[in-house]
Image (spheres, rainbow, N blue to C red):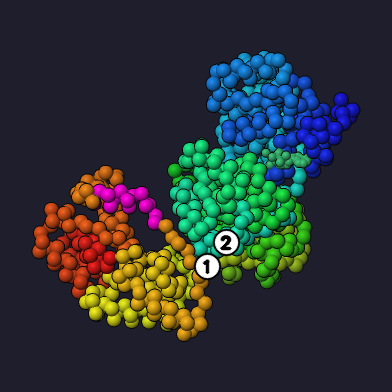
Amino acid sequence: MTGTINLNEQLKHYFGFDSFKGEQEAIIRNLLAGNDTFVLMPTGGGKSLCYQLPSLIMDGTAIVVSPLIALMKNQVDVINGLSEESGVAHYLNSSLNKAAINQVRNDIYAGRTKLLYVAPESLNKEDNLEFFRSFKISFYAVDEAHCISEWGHDFRPEYRNIRPTIQKIGNAPVIALTATATDKVRMDIKKSLGIADAQEFRSSFNRPNLYYEVRQKTNDIDRQIIKFVKQHSGKSGIVYCISRKKVEDLAAVLKANDIKAAPYHAGLDSATRSQTQDDFLMERIDVIVATIAFGMGIDKPDVRFVIHYDIPKSLEGYYQETGRAGRDGGEGICLAFYSYKDLQKLEKFMEGKPVAEQDIGRQLLQETAAYAESSVCRRKLLLHYFGEEYTKDNCGNCDNCLHPKVKRDGKEALLIVLRSLLAVKEGFRQDYVIDFIKGRATDDIVSHHHDQLEEFGAGEDMPPKTWSPVIRQGMIAGYIHKDIESYGLLKVTAAGKRYVRNPQPFTYVEDTDFTDNADEETDDHGAAALDPTLYSMLQDLRRKMARKLSLPGYVIFQDISLEQMATMYPVSIEELRNIQGVGQGKAKRYGKEFCELIRQYCSDNEIERPEEMFVRTVAKDSMKKIKIIHYLDRRMPLDDIASALNLEFSDLLDDLDAIVYSGTKVNIDYFLEDVMDDDQIDDIYEYFRESDTDSIKAALEELGDDYEENEIRLVRIKFMSEQAN
Ligand code: ADP
Ligand code: MG
């Protein structure tokens, strides 16, 4: 029958499109012929049509398994919008009431419904089996099929039951579709769905219009993002963060800096979410700050940038998320921020999970880290990850290609790697092999007696950073194969064995060094350079004022505030308030002279102030802060406040410190008087007045015999509040 159908006519008739995209037609013909079909097509490639059109043509109803209830409704509306009759498409999931379910049944039995979208839970539900058996099924479509695999970026256990359920319902052709699949995921999908012989249609995953860049994540990341967004003002973009809290915080910061932004995550109610989604589509909002809950099925063709605030958990996820940029073929900037610290944090999060899951999670993370640190063409790395070879030397559209690093001779190093792999019988993972090459006699290596081998430590004289990039680039060059089926064991390919016998020139590029040491000590202030001359002038001024007011310097401004001033050059009270540790009160009380000094200094030295870079910060945890102040106003005892807010007492003191150090006055006298004598309070108070540091540690050394840490902290709060604010 397929030969006789004019598919172009049907396409035009139902969808109004003039021609098929990519391999759509071949895919559809394969399915129409009754064959199992496997479709790998990047996001935006047009996968839905591959099952929608055949369902309209074929007898019976197609069952479409799809993971997201929200998307189902959307797709069903689209299909029904194409047709004059109603009920051509329906969905079945836990959100439907009885009447709606009856409507679905009636339409199916009447032969009106060609497409039935079901959530995997609904498909697998025992109660529904009878119903699914009672009508003719044209085929099964499994959308977002990577959800089947634990190695994908969105594993959903219910997807694993699809085949057993089909077995119970009755056979029909299966079409599986996904936008991301490594070899491992592809195998998993075929195995789990029982479609080993399915014909595979695989489009290239290359997205030439996407520009990939990875930057070191530093403490001034917010400022970098604000600057980037302002440089692309009026364009649509998405910023992905890992936690909901970060999403909220960053969206607030962007908004405070006059960017039309909104947060989006699964913790928001669905009305808010769909409003945000709408606002984004209608361009009332430029930037969505989101967890990965946002984006699946978002069909906005002109998203111009996708920023990863945190390193993604897998390269599949990264590819999928960046894939939402530039769907129309126009500009699409993909910027990811990477830090080793983040990586460790993510690994830590996994610790509670089952061991097998941790293992998978770690390997996926390692791949992402390797991608981030590599100096090889990002496009080449990504495509290699998805089993595709990218042959051009320079893609011209990623950071590594635009700023190529010098290539190094890696012939010797590659030989060492290959010989080592053979020596340990190709039975180990990269970490093990690198330890072996470096000559590190770990417990694991000793227990395998591999420290006895001649090749053990063959690379100990070379820089330790050699091995990871050489192995990775050896894989890309086809000498080494990572066997994912056996959990990432490194094997030597036939080409690799030939190389050992007959070595060829081999060059590689070193990884980028992303060690975080640079910003370890500089907490929270920008990476922009501190002006040492100005800094010492500010210190002088502070000293002068301190003497005049007979107060310790830190009461006026803390060091960190001076450092920031010497970096950001604030010249008005308004701007000064953006400096860490400077609240309204402080800015007004002490700020004028500092601003004048800075203004004078800037004009004397013709300094261009980074004005547009002035990031307005927003108070973190502002709800908690408001509550605490509210309770204080009601003179609630501090221990009661702590328990009301579910805090340890010392946590509450931390919060109070944060409040007074950011310039807000609080009055805790009513509590102090209850728990301490006036003499004691005065004693500690005087200590702080005389001391040249506000450090609690120093205070304890001086007063520790007489006072508890908490007492000292309480009085310091009173002192800072009265003297500094
Ligand atoms: P995917 O699921 O692969 O990410 P979709 O199925 O959502 O992609 O399709 C992406 C966009 O491409 C949709 O707006 C769809 O209408 C459009 N599209 C699909 N096929 C064609 C075609 N043959 N001609 C024109 N537009 C198409
Ligand atoms: Mg889709």
On residue 230, the disc is: 2
Mark 2 lies on a secondary structure that is: helix
Residue at image point 36% right, 76% down: 594
The percent coordinates of residue 277 (x first, y second) are 57, 43
Residue at image point 62% right, 45% down: 281
Contact? badges 2 and 1 (CB < 8 Å): yes
Q: Foreground residue, 140 or 149?
A: 140
The percent coordinates of residue 26 (x first, y second) are 82, 37
On residue 725, the disc is: none
Magenta span includes 620: yes
Q: Residue furthest bottom?
A: 604
**Mark 1 residue crowding within 10 angstroms, few (<14) / some (14–19) / many (20+):** few
Q: Is residue 661 above or below residue 8?
A: below
Q: Quadrant of ligand 2?
A: top right
Residue at image point 42% right, 68% down: 575
Q: Quadrant of residue 84?
A: top right
Task: Name the kind of residue labelled 2 in the image.
Answer: Lys
The percent coordinates of residue 723 (x first, y second) are 24, 68
The residue that label 1 is drawn on is: 612
Q: Residue furthest right?
A: 4
Quadrant in the picture for the C terminus: bottom left
Disc 1, ligand 1: is the CB inside 8 Å? no
Q: What's drawn in magenta, residue-wise?
A: 619-632
